Image (tube, helix red, strand yellow):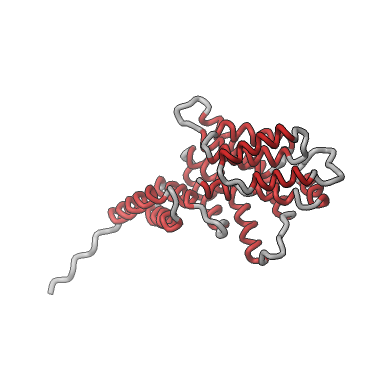
Amino acid sequence: MKKRILLGLSTAVLISVAVVGAVAQQQQQQSQFGGPAQAPATPPPAEEQAALQNMLQTYDPQQRVALVEEFLAKYPDSVLRMHVYAAGAEAYQVQRNFEKAIEYGERALELNPRYAGALLLVADSLALSAVPTQLDYQQRLTRAENYVQQALEVLPDMLATMPRRPEVPEEEFDRQRKYFEAQPHAILGFVYLRRNENGKAEEELKLATDLNQWRPEPVDFQRLGYAHLRQKEYAEAESAFRRCVELGGPAGADCQRRADQAQQMLKTQAPPEPPKPQE
């Protein structure tokens, strides 16, 4: 879980960090992402910037939520509020409090409807919180898909203005950009998987895992494995599940079982060996 709060859907964190850097960069990003019509001519106060930085560097989700609430109470009119709401949404998602994650993500979107990180946080929380036995199951998945599609529309602008720190090599920076590019496809693949649209899920999850060479997510390979398994593509399923196991994490045990299952199913599909010639 700690890794999840650190990385999360890092588009939200990325923009938050970038926005406190310089006035020109902040104004450019707010224009690109459809921010408030009256952008400030001066940077946010140093104490607000420091509070946001401290929040983003706090990996414990409960502590981060406390810092979010403290910031909102102390600076109710801060121009950094949308980033604070996104940070809160991420922390709530890690705690699997999906309703609060959706609420805080949508508060960020009220301030900036083109905020890519918040769009993805809300979409992911909706997909994760959808329960098949509840009446709003399909509605939640539809809302999640709509949020992802909106994120796909604005993400190219975000990536085009994504700042590169001087110490980051160009090759590494390109891998980082592809990581962010992979996120909406991973979520969209999960939505399709939950709908049993397995071919579409496979397509999106394959794209996500191909793009994300920077910080591969075991769960993406787990979901890709399920998409293959449901389509009786046992060799591909085994490969995806084995990759999940290699990456480690909580999904590893399930992926190991599923990899073994796919391997066994593959053996039953194999044609019988031809009889050996008589000597």
Horizontal and vertical percent position of residue 10: 62, 49
Is residue 46 shown left or right of residue 217?
A: right
Horizontal and vertical percent position of residue 77: 78, 34
The residue positioned farthest toward the bottom in the image shown = 279
Please tell me which residue is depicted at 52% across the width and 38% down the height of the picture.
95
The correct choice, above or below, for 148 with respect to 180 in the image is above
Can residue 70 be seen by looking at this rendering?
Answer: yes
The correct choice, above or below, for 162 with respect to 149 in the image is below
The answer to which image quadrant residue 271 occupies is bottom left
Along the line of sight, the residue nearer the viewer: 79 or 157: 79
Horizontal and vertical percent position of residue 248: 44, 54
Along the line of sight, the residue nearer the viewer: 165 or 194: 165
Is residue 238 shown left or right of residue 40?
A: left
The residue positioned farthest toward the top in the image shown = 135
Horizontal and vertical percent position of residue 237: 41, 53
Q: Quadrant of the C terminus?
A: bottom left
Give the tally of numbered discs: 0
Please tell me which residue is depicted at 54% across the width and 34% down the height of the picture.
97
The answer to which image quadrant residue 38 occupies is top right
The residue positioned farthest toward the right in the image shown = 41
Can residue 12 be seen by looking at this rendering?
Answer: no
Please tell me which residue is depicted at 66% across the width and 61% down the height of the picture.
173
